[in-house]
């Protein structure tokens, strides 16, 4: 089976901030991807980013290139990430949700490059000339742009997430048995009686209210012994 995630090349062009490089590397690792390529990074930033928490191994494996052409040479598909802004593009511009599906589909067959431009200028015209199409994160205003590290994380999350996961029901929690619930009720009522909370004239109705309350709590079977242990300690203290 093809490891489609290993087919993605995240390409960062002329990045200057080590925090952005480190954040991007952490996102790559967190979402199960492995290939980071940098094109003409600011040297100081790239050296400092190598010590980023949780990202150092991936950064040490990062490939450095002198041009975009070299960085994407082995890729069948090249996509540029852009905020859109007021620019007019000669490329199809797709929203993240749709673009991520297309990229994921292509990754099964061959390497794909996802390009991110510099923090200040984004992708230049020469960078864009290597792309088949562009992808944008749908911010509320097309003129707004996201932090570079956040943009990388969002794009990779959209590719990594499993839409079917939301339909998976959580495992059922086994409720406490009726006997356990009744034991908790009895211990709680005893503690309330010793503390003076229970009025002898209304003891019967209080007992019914407490019993209903304990049932509404839906105590889990695994939590019942813990709760009873707490009540035993309280009763022991009240006994003093």
Image (spheres, rainbow, N blue to C red):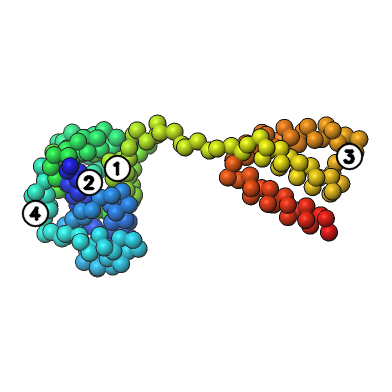
Q: CB atoms at circles 4 and 3 under 8 Å apart?
A: no
Q: CA distance from mark 4 to mark 1?
A: 26 Å
Residue 182 place in picture, x, y as percent? 71, 38
Q: CB atoms at circles 1 and 2 under 8 Å apart?
A: yes
Residue 217 place in picture, x, y as percent? 65, 37
The residue under label 3 is 199
Residue 70 is marked as 4
First reached walking from the N terminus: tag 4 or tag 1? 4
Residue closer to the observer: 2 or 94: 2
Secondary element at image label 2? helix
First reached walking from the N terminus: tag 3 or tag 2? 2
Q: CA distance from mark 4 to mark 3?
A: 84 Å
Q: CB atoms at circles 4 and 1 under 8 Å apart?
A: no
Q: Residues within 10 Å of mark 3 (few under 14, many from 20)?
A: few
The residue under label 2 is 5
The residue under label 1 is 160
Residue closer to the observer: 33 or 174: 174
**Left or right, 220 with reference to 38:** right
Q: Do we see residue 186 in this rendering? A: yes
Could you tell me which residue is drawn at 77 percent across and 33 percent down?
209
């Amino acid at each position: 089976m093809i490891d489609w995630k290993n087919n993605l090349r995240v390409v960062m062009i002329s990045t200057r901030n080590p925090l952005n490089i480190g954040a991007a590397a952490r996102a790559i690792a967190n979402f199960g991807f492995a290939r980071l390529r940098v094109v003409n990074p600011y040297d100081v930033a790239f050296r400092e980013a190598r010590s980023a928490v949780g990202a150092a191994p991936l950064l040490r494996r990062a490939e450095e290139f002198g041009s975009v052409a070299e960085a994407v040479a082995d890729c069948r598909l090249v996509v540029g990430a852009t905020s859109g802004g007021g620019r007019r593009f000669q490329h199809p511009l797709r929203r993240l949700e749709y673009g991520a599906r297309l990229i994921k589909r292509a990754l099964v067959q061959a390497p794909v490059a996802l390009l991110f431009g510099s923090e200040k200028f984004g992708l230049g015209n020469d960078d864009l000339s290597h792309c088949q199409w562009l992808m944008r994160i749908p911010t509320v205003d097309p003129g707004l742009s996201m932090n570079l590290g956040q943009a990388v994380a969002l794009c990779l999350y959209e590719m990594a997430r499993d839409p079917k996961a939301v339909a998976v029901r959580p495992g059922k929690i086994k409720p406490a048995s009726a006997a356990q619930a009744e034991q908790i009720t009895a211990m709680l009522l005893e503690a309330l009686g010793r503390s003076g909370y229970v009025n002898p004239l209304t003891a019967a109705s209080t007992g019914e209210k407490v019993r209903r309350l304990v049932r509404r709590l839906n105590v889990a079977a695994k939590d019942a012994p813990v709760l009873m242990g707490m009540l035993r300690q309280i009763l022991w203290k009240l006994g003093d």
